[in-house]
Image: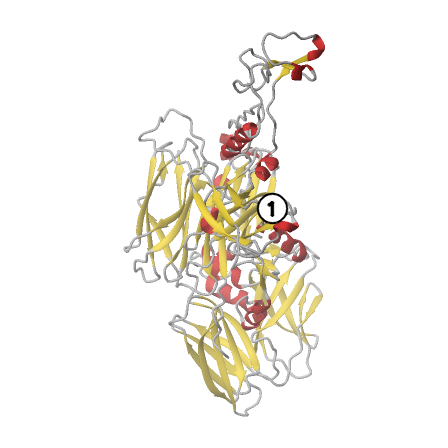
């Protein structure tokens, strides 16, 4: 019955600037990292680990680290032209959101890659259920409200019908009692239906569909039913019933995201109405649990509270259509459910609708308020938050009736097991400096210098007595690749752990299920979108390859030049011979130039000019300085190269007030901004230019307020 303590865990919402990409394009992502319980922007994570994998493959085609600042991370992923067509998964991990064991993984978004945009097919009509064909097999599952069927009193039972592919289906069936039809029941939404009946002791019940029976679980004779009679803005009204009139004390507890909000007490005889005040509860999935006076659980139920309490994102100053390269101005307003201004942190993306996946209906609202709350795959979670669906509140209540409280990720059972989970990642990278010889194995701190290739950024660090050090987020900002140099007369080895190995090991051992919330039901494919033909003649990127030997960055080239001359005593004498003993000194030789050089024993016999020599006393060949591999250079200078935060240029957004409008512009992603902050009036204005693509464009803004309310909004316009 205790109020749960804060978990300190975070939840990552990951979004890309569109859903479908042409191989070779830039992918831009943004992530909100929120406190798992309060939905406020989290401060405990500072590093986001991001990787892109092909669906069905364990190997990553991209893996990099990015900074997290006050709960927000954003960046760029390069998609090589060599990527094959298909579906890829972009996944994000942080220290406080990824644990072991973790059977389900939510911070993942699908990405489709195409080599040719003319191959895009996404013009579907989606539905909530599949229509059954004649004789198709159906599986029905029953969910009594409160988790138990009780004889002698009216019970509410939800049922779910799915086909062999586990897709929801719509059907009409008959309720039978002892082999006699009693009533007709139908699915209402997402393959879910509901019926009410009063079970009799000794009777058996089933639903019959096309001659096949689904047995309803037997009822028990003793128990208490928990029925939600009404759900309003200020209260929940529960009706409790018992087949016996004996008075008993009961407690009803309501908790949201692991925090107890209300505990009410009452005396139950045969029935009892309990009204629970919820005006101050945060919106979302709540767990109602009924206890007897010994605190034994009598019944449980999930319910959604404050359906309309969220961040509202609206747009103005938009036109229905724009000309190519015309400037678009959008005024964004953020308010609460009563229309009062609310400052908020938002992301905004604008893209050609051709590059949107209609099956991917996830947004920040249905992700945090529903998808991440349940350990189940949801079909089109956006339905439950779309104001155009008048049945959305009834539909989400139906959905929650089919979810047992054990499936509530922040329910009592799950919270009790959280202390057994182990962190897979840290908010820093562990490094070790190890002596390579026994004589050097003295337990003392070693000084380190961390710097970028130009040595414009220098940071100092020190190991502990065991040679251990940690690279924090500040260190990782030094560069995408940076150097760590140790200071010791003895030779040591330096190693920095690879966090992606820990991720790979955990996922390989546990195979967490990626909950994508994108399994839409395709009712009809309405033909190819003609807009894709505009992209048929896009220029492919020209890649120019240079010849010759080179290093990955300029600093390694600098080290190579130092190593060439370090300990190198070669010279060109005044006479033009290499290492002439008569000259004794001279200038540095030039790489690749042909020089003559005396060989032993003749060389030792010469002391002055002039001298005579035969053909066997000399050699003539091009001069080459010593060549070092990158590994040899690093070892020579007591350094390693390690990975820091991935760095990238800004998202390209042209300004046609200043730039040449005659240049063809084929951008399909017009705007991307991972952080727009609305002011105290809840307002912000953004401007961007259209491209030459004539199509319908979609704008999506998503974000969170300081009070932990999430919200999303969309707008559309055409370019003609």
Nearer to me, 465 or 284: 465
Tell me if residue 360 can be seen.
no
| Dot 1: element | strand
Q: How many marks?
A: 1
Nearer to me, 124 or 671: 671
Quarter in which the C terminus is drawn: top left
The image quadrant that residue 317 belongs to is top left
Nearer to me, 596 or 146: 596
Q: Residue 32, position in %: x, y?
A: 45, 54
The image quadrant that residue 639 belongs to is top right
Asked if residue 371 is positioned above or below residue 490 in the image, the reply reads below
Instruction: Indicate how the structure is coloured in the image.
Output: secondary structure
Farthest-out residue, left: 681
Q: Look at 43% across and 39% down and name the residue there.
A: 696
The local crowd at label 1, few if under 14, some if 14 to 19, many if 20 or more residues have their Cα within 10 Å, is some
Q: Residue 574, position in %: x, y?
A: 53, 12
Tell me if residue 263 can be seen.
yes
Asked if residue 34 is positioned above or below residue 257 in the image, the reply reads above
Q: Residue 474, position in %: x, y?
A: 44, 50
Nearer to me, 287 or 28: 28
Q: Look at 56% across and 78% down and name the residue there.
A: 299
Q: Residue 648, position in %: x, y?
A: 46, 39
The residue tagged 1 is: 493
């Amino acid at each position: 019955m205790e109020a749960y303590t804060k978990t300190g865990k975070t939840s990552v919402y990951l979004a890309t600037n569109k859903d479908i990409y042409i191989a070779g394009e830039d992918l831009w992502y943004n992530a909100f990292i929120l406190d798992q319980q309060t939905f406020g922007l989290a401060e405990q994570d500072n590093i986001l680990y991001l990787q892109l994998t092909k669906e069905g493959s364990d190997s990553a085609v991209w893996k990099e680290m990015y900074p997290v600042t006050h709960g927000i991370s954003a960046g760029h992923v390069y998609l090589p032209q060599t990527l094959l067509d298909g579906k890829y998964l972009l996944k994000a991990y942080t220290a406080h959101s990824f644990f072991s064991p973790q059977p389900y993984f939510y911070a993942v978004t699908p990405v489709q890659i195409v080599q040719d945009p003319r191959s895009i097919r996404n013009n579907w009509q989606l539905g909530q259920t599949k229509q059954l064909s004649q004789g198709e097999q159906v599986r029905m599952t029953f969910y009594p409200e409160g988790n138990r069927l009780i004889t002698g009193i009216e019970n509410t039972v939800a049922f779910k019908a799915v086909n062999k592919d586990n897709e929801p289906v719509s059907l009409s069936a008959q309720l039978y009692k002892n082999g006699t039809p009693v009533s007709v029941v139908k699915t209402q939404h997402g393959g879910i239906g509901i019926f009410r009946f009063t079970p009799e002791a000794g009777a058996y019940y089933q639903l019959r569909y096309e001659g096949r029976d689904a047995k309803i679980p037997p009822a028990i004779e003793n128990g208490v039913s928990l029925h939600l009679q009404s759900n309003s803005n200020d209260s929940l009204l529960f009706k409790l019933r018992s087949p016996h009139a004996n008075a008993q004390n009961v407690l009803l507890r309501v908790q949201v995201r692991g925090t107890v909000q209300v505990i009410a007490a009452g005396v139950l005889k045969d029935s009892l109405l309990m009204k629970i005040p919820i005006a101050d509860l945060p919106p979302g999935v709540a767990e109602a649990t009924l206890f007897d006076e010994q605190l034994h659980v009598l019944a449980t139920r999930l319910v959604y509270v404050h359906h309309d309490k969220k961040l509202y994102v609206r747009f103005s100053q938009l036109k229905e259509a724009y000309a190519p390269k015309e400037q678009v101005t959008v005024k964004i307003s953020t308010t609460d459910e009563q229309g009062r201004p609310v400052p908020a942190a938002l992301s905004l993306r604008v893209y050609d609708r051709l590059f949107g996946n209609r099956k991917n209906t996830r947004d920040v609202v249905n992700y945090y308020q529903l998808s991440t709350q349940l350990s189940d795959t949801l079909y089109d979670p956006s339905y439950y938050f779309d104001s155009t669906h008048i049945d959305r509140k009834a539909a989400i209540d139906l959905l929650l009736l089919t979810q047992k409280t054990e499936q509530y990720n922040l329910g009592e059972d799950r919270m009790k097991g959280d202390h057994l989970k182990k962190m897979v990642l840290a908010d820093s990278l562990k490094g070790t400096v190890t002596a390579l010889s026994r004589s050097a194995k003295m337990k003392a701190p070693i000084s380190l210098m961390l710097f970028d290739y130009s040595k414009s950024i220098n940071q100092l660090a020190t190991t502990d007595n065991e040679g251990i050090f940690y690279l924090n987020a500040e260190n990782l900002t030094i560069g995408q690749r940076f150097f760590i140099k140790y200071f010791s007369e003895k030779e040591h080895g330096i190693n920095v752990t690879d966090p992606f190995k820990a991720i790979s090991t955990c996922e390989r051992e546990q195979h967490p299920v990626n909950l994508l919330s994108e399994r839409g039901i395709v009712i009809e494919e309405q033909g190819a979108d003609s807009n894709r033909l505009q992209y048929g003649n896009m220029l492919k990127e020209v890649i120019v390859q240079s010849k010759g030997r080179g290093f990955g960055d300029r600093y390694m080239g600098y080290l190579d030049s130092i190593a060439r001359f370090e300990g190198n005593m070669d010279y060109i004498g005044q006479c033009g011979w290499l290492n002439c003993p008569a000259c004794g000194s001279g200038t540095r030789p030039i790489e690749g130039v042909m020089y003559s050089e005396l060989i032993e024993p003749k060389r030792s016999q010469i002391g002055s000019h002039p001298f005579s020599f035969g053909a066997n006393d000399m050699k003539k060949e091009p001069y080459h300085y010593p060549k070092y591999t990158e590994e040899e250079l690093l070892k020579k200078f007591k350094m390693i190269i390690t990975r820091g935060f991935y760095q990238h240029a800004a998202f390209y957004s042209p300004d046609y007030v200043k730039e040449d409008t005659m240049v063809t512009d084929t951008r399909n992603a017009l705007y991307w901004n991972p952080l727009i902050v609305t002011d105290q009036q809840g307002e912000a204005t953004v401007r961007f230019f259209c491209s030459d693509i004539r199509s319908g464009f979609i704008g999506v803004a998503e974000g969170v307020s300081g009070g932990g309310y999430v919200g999303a909004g969309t707008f559309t316009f055409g370019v003609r």
